[in-house]
Amino acid sequence: MSEWREKSKQAQDRPYNHRYSDIHDLVQKAAGKEQALILVLDHLTDVGNFGALIRSAEVVGADGIIIPNRRAAQVNDAVFRTSAGAVEWIPIVQVPNLVAAMATLKEAGFWIAGVTEHAGQGIWQAPLDGRLALVMGAEDTGISRLVRESCDFEFQIPQFGRTQSLNVAQAATVALYEWRRRQQ
């Protein structure tokens, strides 16, 4: 049986107890890298979206994920399964204050980019290289005001159809892969 299947079976048998990382360990992991990526999730509540985001971030080689410790989905057995076990391979940090965490990232040389449909520039014009933290907002309200004001810049993903917006997990995956594409 594959390692992931074994862990998934174990998760079904008992509640998954995730060990969160520390933001300083995450910053240290990215130290010295010219290209680093951290995903910041602003109060996402849907465990399906959260698990899918973890999986996408791990697949593109992101250095970690930061989430608030309240009013947000937490790593549990459903998130483990949805992430296909990726929660085991990427550091996930819980913080009491996203704005303070973003300030820590800025001190470590990260640019903070908000992904929002309200941005003036599109993803293809946005400077998505170097040390970058991508901020994704909640499914229903988007990026909160204080978090948005703490971003260095914002960009949107152009939409050409009639549907109003992408699902947050889909939008994040597009942004994550555009960052990865530019690293090639």
Image (cartoon, rainbow, N blue to C red):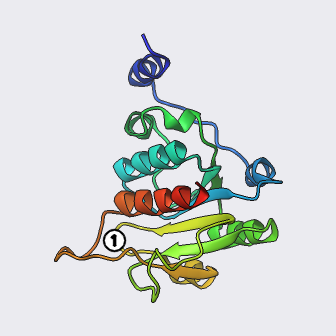
Q: Within 10 Å of the Cα at label 1, are there few (<14), some (14-19), or many (20+) other Cα atoms? A: few
Residue depicted at 47% across the width and 32% down the height: 85
- The vertical placement of 20 against 181, above or below, is above
Q: Position of residue 42 (x, y in %)?
A: 51, 66
Q: Amino acid at mark 1?
A: Asp
- The vertical placement of 155 against 89, above or below, is below
| Residue closer to the observer: 128 or 100 | 128
Q: Residue furthest bottom?
A: 120
- The vertical placement of 153 against 85, above or below, is below
Q: Quadrant of residue 179?
A: bottom right
Query: Which residue is the site of mark 1?
Result: 140
Q: Residue furthest left?
A: 162
Q: Position of residue 182 (x, y in %)?
A: 56, 61
| Residue closer to the observer: 167 or 79 | 167
Q: Quadrant of residue 89?
A: top right
Q: Position of residue 119 (x, y in %)?
A: 45, 85
